Image (cartoon, grey):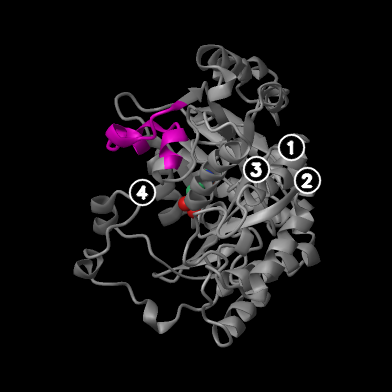
Amino acid sequence: MTPPTAAPAAPAASATPAATDLEALWMPFTANKAFKAKPRLLVGAKDMHYRSDDGRTILDGTAGLWCVNAGHCRQPIVDAIARTAGTLDFAPSFQMGHPLSFQLANAVKAILPTGLDHVFFSNSGSEAVDSALKIALAYHRANGQPERTRFIGRERGYHGVGFGGISVGGIAPNKAAFAAQLLPQVDHLPHTHDLARNAFTRGMPAHGAELADALEAMVATHGAHTIAAVIVEPVAGSTGVLIPPKGYLERLRAICDRHGILLIFDEVITGFGRLGTPFAAQYFNVMPDMITLAKGITNAAVPMGATVVQHRIYDTVVQATEKGIEFFHGYTYSGHPLASAAGIATLGLYAAEGLLTRAATLAPVWEEALHSMRALPHVIDVRNLGLVGGIELAPRDGAPGMRAYDVLVNAFAEQDVLIRTTGDIIALSPPLIISEAQIGELIERVGRAIRAVA
Ligand SMILES: Cc1ncc(COP(=O)(O)O)c(C=O)c1O
């Protein structure tokens, strides 16, 4: 593994914009007014660190947004993108092909659980999810069961921001403004967060496998013949790190099998080594029918998403049409040459440095360090798996989310560390190249931020 180095000097073009220059950009999932009053700008990155516009080196506790698994600006990926940009900037993705997207599909297949062997490319996790939902409908239709149209998601689930994704998703604020136009036939399983029984669990919680049985109740209500697919994150990330209870995913799989329902794992966060195996399906030894991917597939250097499916799903859809296009879906940039090149280089780097299993080696150190935060003020839970950690804080009276937000601001401005927060939960997911010493440093800095705002 390349030893992490300091972040590079900021290029001249990175001068802090004037306040008026910040106005034109409508920032996503951001408190725009608060941000523009006091911006936090990143202008460079290398390995484990960002560089801020005021020249500070910031330790990356979140791999960007759970996506820069091999660390920042890694040379083989940079070179592959540069080379491809000068050779094949774009190739039409409909009725035409280019070798790099086929090569990447094969490289992804090589690390997927056995049986998942066809890859449909898109440009984001949201698109990967919407593609998966469409594939589920297309599969059942081609399989002679067109009445299977209902989707089952889960409370607190995050599946991106497309109308399909927010419909099956279960994070209330992400749906509130759009509730009038969500997909019509969707139910949600109960979430698995249970502080009363599982607080401060190391690894998988003992209690909650029975929550999967809610799926049986939905089958009883609607009839199995109406249900197309269940979609869940094996470890729920964006809602604040919810680790599945022991036996829960197995139970979900068994119920799906019993009733011919497709099981989709949304591995946009857990894919590419986050838990110490290439995919969470392998970690939990539960095989879904489809997996949605994004983020780590290119180490986030070029946007890309992918929906991977079992052979029978591809085969059923493709064989159902005698001539012509079999599946009316795709994106201009599906399998874009730059993204494909970045993906091939990324998977090469993961293999060369053993990054897809490195989290398994680091997990005991990570767990010990995280749980040392238990005694900090207002901490009501600490949870972990692989190289993911969640620290839940008690909300302030009448101001949910503000305590963790203040920790995020303090961590960045005063402790030189980037963290992520959802509600009053701090989520940590550092690049997989993190050293044991840097784990200690990360936890120390986050601890200082928690104490500072207590
Ligand atoms: C599980 C999951 N699915 C889907 C998405 C959406 O991905 P994107 O933001 O690339 O559309 C995310 C993003 O964090 C995610 O965590």
Check residue 306 for magenta coloring: no
How busy is the neighbourhood of tag 1: few (under 14 within 10 Å), some, or many (20 plus)? Answer: many
Task: Give the numbered dot on residue 29.
Answer: 4
Vertical order, 321 against 175 (above or below)? below
Q: Nearer the viewer, mark 1 or mark 2?
A: 2
Residue hosting label 2: 115
Residue hosting label 1: 287
Q: Nearer the viewer, mark 4 or mark 3?
A: 3
**Residue 211 image position (x, y, % from top left):** 60, 17
**Residue 29 image position (x, y, % from top left):** 36, 49
Vertical order, 418 against 387 (above or below)? below
Question: Are the residues at dot 4 and dot 3 in contact (C-beta closer than 8 Å)?
Answer: no
- Which region of the structure is painted magenta? 164-186
Q: Is residue 148 visible?
A: yes
Check residue 168 for magenta coloring: yes
Figure quadrant of the C terminus: top left
Residue hosting label 3: 290
**Residue 127 image position (x, y, % from top left):** 49, 52
Q: How far apart, in angstroms, are the residues tagged by discs 2 and 3?
A: 10 Å
